[in-house]
Image (cartoon, rainbow, N blue to C red):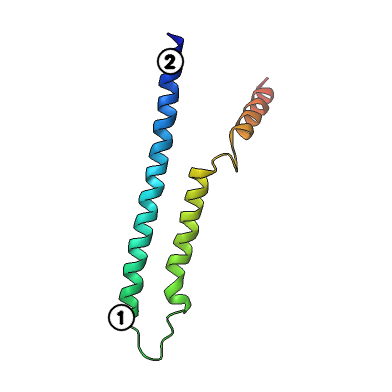
Amino acid sequence: MENNIEQRIRYRAAEKRVKKLKGFYIHSIVFVFVNVLILVLKMTKLYPEENFWSWEYLKLPLFWGIGLAAHGVSVFFPTLILGKSWEEKKIRELMEKDK
């Protein structure tokens, strides 16, 4: 009985992890396709005196890329910041405070 409960708990944890991975992969694919499309459209409308490497053309991929990187860190390195040890420490701290 206990083994069955443990299996279900592990299954739910794996299922949650797969959903996070899927979300990151979808985010990455959308990032690539949208930014390639936007950059191609902007390149076709460039005037001879315009520079492609200007801030106007690079700010969307840059800031979205920072968001995508943060998403990746939260998926692939979830314990890097505010991980399980932090949670347990905070729980103990709050329990002591409520005494």
Badge 1 element: helix
Q: Amino acid at mark 1?
A: Thr
Q: Which mark is on residue 2? A: none
Q: Residue furthest bottom?
A: 49
Quadrant (top left, top right, bottom left, bottom right) of the N terminus: top left
Above or below, comparing residue 68 to residue 1 in the picture? below
Above or below, comparing residue 50 to residue 81 in the picture? below
Image coords of residue 80 (percent x, y): 60, 43
Mark 1 crowd level (few <14, some 14–19, many ≥20, 10 Å Cα): few
Badge 2 element: helix
- Where does label 2 land, which residue? 5
> Residue 83: which quarter of the image?
top right
Above or below, comparing residue 63 to residue 9 in the picture? below
Q: Residue at coordinates 43% horizontally, 66% vertically from top-left? A: 61
The span from disc 2 to disc 1 (Cα, nearest Å) is 59 Å
71 relative to 90 in the view: left or right: left
Image coords of residue 35 (percent x, y): 37, 66
Q: Residue at coordinates 33% horizontally, 70% vertically from top-left? A: 38
Image coords of residue 37 (percent x, y): 31, 68
Image coords of residue 57 (percent x, y): 42, 75
- Where does label 1 land, which residue? 44
First-in-chain label (2 vs 1)? 2
